[in-house]
Amino acid sequence: MDIKEIVARIGIIRTRANLSARALSLAIGKNASYIHLLESSKTTFEPSLSVLLDIIEVCGSTPEEFFSYDINQYKQDKQTLEFLKTLSPYQKEAIMNLYKK
């Protein structure tokens, strides 16, 4: 995942949390324009790991969700994995065989 994808995901979780760029900036203890500048394609600075984790937390997300393969499918993927964990090895094999056909 490159910095452009990280910044795009910040925008996704910020929007989901119904936070303005200014509100998120202030919530993480930064200058009011921090998130706006970060999300602007005109800047090249990158958030530190601790700032990124603060952003994720304030937006009500988790690092697992933020860095998941497809953030828009995360909840469904997680539910699917939890369901698969409840199946017997035979049932898992049957599903895989159906998938392969």
Image (cartoon, grey):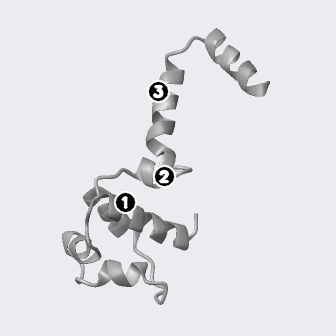
Instruction: State left or right for residue 6 relative to residue 26.
Output: right
Q: Earlier in the sequence, mark 3 or mark 1?
A: 1
User: Mark 3 sits on what residue?
Assistant: 82
Q: CA distance from mark 1 to mark 2?
A: 9 Å
Q: Amino acid at mark 2?
A: Ile
User: Mark 2 sits on what residue?
Assistant: 71
Instruction: State left or right for residue 6 relative to residue 22.
Output: right
Residue 50: x %, y % from top left = 34, 66
In front of the other: label 3 or label 1? Answer: 1
Q: CA distance from mark 3 to mark 1?
A: 23 Å
Q: Amino acid at mark 1?
A: Ile
User: Mark 1 sits on what residue?
Assistant: 13
Q: Earlier in the sequence, mark 1 or mark 2?
A: 1
Q: Residues within 10 Å of mark 3 (few under 14, many from 20)?
A: few
Secondary structure of the residue carrying numbered label 2: helix
Q: Residue at 47%, 36% (x, y): give it.
A: 78
89 in relation to 22, above or below: above
In this rendering, the count of numbered labels is 3
Q: Residue at 51%, 30% (x, y): give it.
A: 80
Residue nearer the viewer, 5 or 49: 5
Q: Residues within 10 Å of mark 2 (few under 14, many from 20)?
A: some
